[in-house]
């Protein structure tokens, strides 16, 4: 796994007394457990029995699990923190990132479609739309939007 | 599972609805709130009409009937839910006369944001104890 790297986007000054500042833009996020954790979660979802929520949920469709694995395999390395892998009651799943008022949900709605929610209650963002599951660029843009709000030192 | 034409009577907008959180997957622990996945539809979403039950009885159902001792309970307003496209219908079950179903009647194009809007309105009734 590659180490965390930072692109030096814009250098205005290092003199804090003058009120100038350095601006850094994070381009990668080092999450060494991403692949293992998500893979384990997908395996776990594949073992869920019917009625896994005790309220009539369907088992997770193995084809959806395969589509989720393929989707993740197309993403660049070190793009994001590890998402929650959330089973959905009708037998599909979504990846969720949550940080305070900001959330990103990428739902594998069917084998060809991702249904997403881009949410920031403080900024008034409630964007919902669809894109093809193989549109990695769109997924990457959304994930980078979310990760732009998360600061870890 | 009822179809639209066979649904039970509408629950009054002034009611509160108790929703079980039966699995850690539906709880965003870091934010101490439900995931919008807790309001994913279909299938219809089970709730209890608050005026027809008690927190104690609903807690007992969660722990004993559903065998989810670590689960939690949240509450949402019926009128608020209806405003987001969730139609609450009183559909009692043999062992739970307070039972109702939430049906999402809105567009799939806004299903996720409406579920999230509903989550924003929740009140915590019983804290989940998931590890």
Image (cartoon, grey):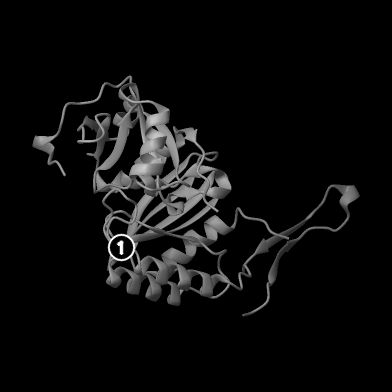
Q: Position of residue B11 (x, y in %)?
A: 24, 25
Q: Position of residue A68 (x, y in %)?
A: 37, 70
Query: Which of the 4 image quadrants contains residue A67?
Result: bottom left
Work out whether A97 lies above or below B9. below
Q: Is residue B75 left or right of residue A82?
A: left
Local packing at callout 1 (Cα closer than 10 Å; few below 14, some 14-19, many 20+) is few
Q: Name which residue lies at 26% across and 21% down.
A: B12
Question: Which image quarter is the C terminus of chain A in?
Answer: bottom right
Residue that label 1 marks? A49
Q: Name which residue lies at 38% across and 76% down.
A: A70
User: Furthest residue to the left?
Assistant: B5
Badge 1 marks a residue whose secondary structure is loop
Q: Nearer the viewer, residue A35 or B66?
A: B66
Q: Nearer the viewer, residue B33 or B109?
A: B33
User: Furthest residue to the bottom?
Assistant: A1
Q: Nearer the viewer, residue A72 or A34?
A: A34
Query: Which of the 4 image quadrants contains residue A47?
Result: bottom left
Q: Name which residue lies at 27% across and 55% down.
A: A90
Q: Is residue B126 visible?
A: yes
């Amino acid at each position: 796994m590659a180490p965390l790297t930072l692109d030096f986007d814009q250098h205005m000054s290092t003199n804090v007394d003058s009120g100038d500042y350095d601006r850094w833009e994070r381009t990668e996020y080092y999450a060494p457990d991403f692949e293992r954790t998500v893979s384990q979660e997908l395996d776990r979802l594949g073992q869920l029995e019917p009625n896994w929520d005790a309220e009539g949920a369907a088992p997770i469709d193995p084809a959806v699990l395969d589509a989720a694995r393929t989707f993740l395999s197309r993403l660049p390395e070190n793009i994001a923190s590890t998402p929650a892998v959330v089973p959905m009651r009708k037998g599909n799943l979504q990846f969720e990132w949550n940080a305070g008022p900001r959330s990103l949900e990428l739902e594998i709605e069917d084998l060809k479609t991702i249904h997403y929610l881009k949410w920031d209650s403080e900024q008034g963002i409630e964007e919902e739309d669809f894109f093809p599951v193989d549109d990695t660029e769109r997924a990457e843009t959304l994930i980078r939007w979310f990760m732009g709000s998360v600061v870890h030192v | 599972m009822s179809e639209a034409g066979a649904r039970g009577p509408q629950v009054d907008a002034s009611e509160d609805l108790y929703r079980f959180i039966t699995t850690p997957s539906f709880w965003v622990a870091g934010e101490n709130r439900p995931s919008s996945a807790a309001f994913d539809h279909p299938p219809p979403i089970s709730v209890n009409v608050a005026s027809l039950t008690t927190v104690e009885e609903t807690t007992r159902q969660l722990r004993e009937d559903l065998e989810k001792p670590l689960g939690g309970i949240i509450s949402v307003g019926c009128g608020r839910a209806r405003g987001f496209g969730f139609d609450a219908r009183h559909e009692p079950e043999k062992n739970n006369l307070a039972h109702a179903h939430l049906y999402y009647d809105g567009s799939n194009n806004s299903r996720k944001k409406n579920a999230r809007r509903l989550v924003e309105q929740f009140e915590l009734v019983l804290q989940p104890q998931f590890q």
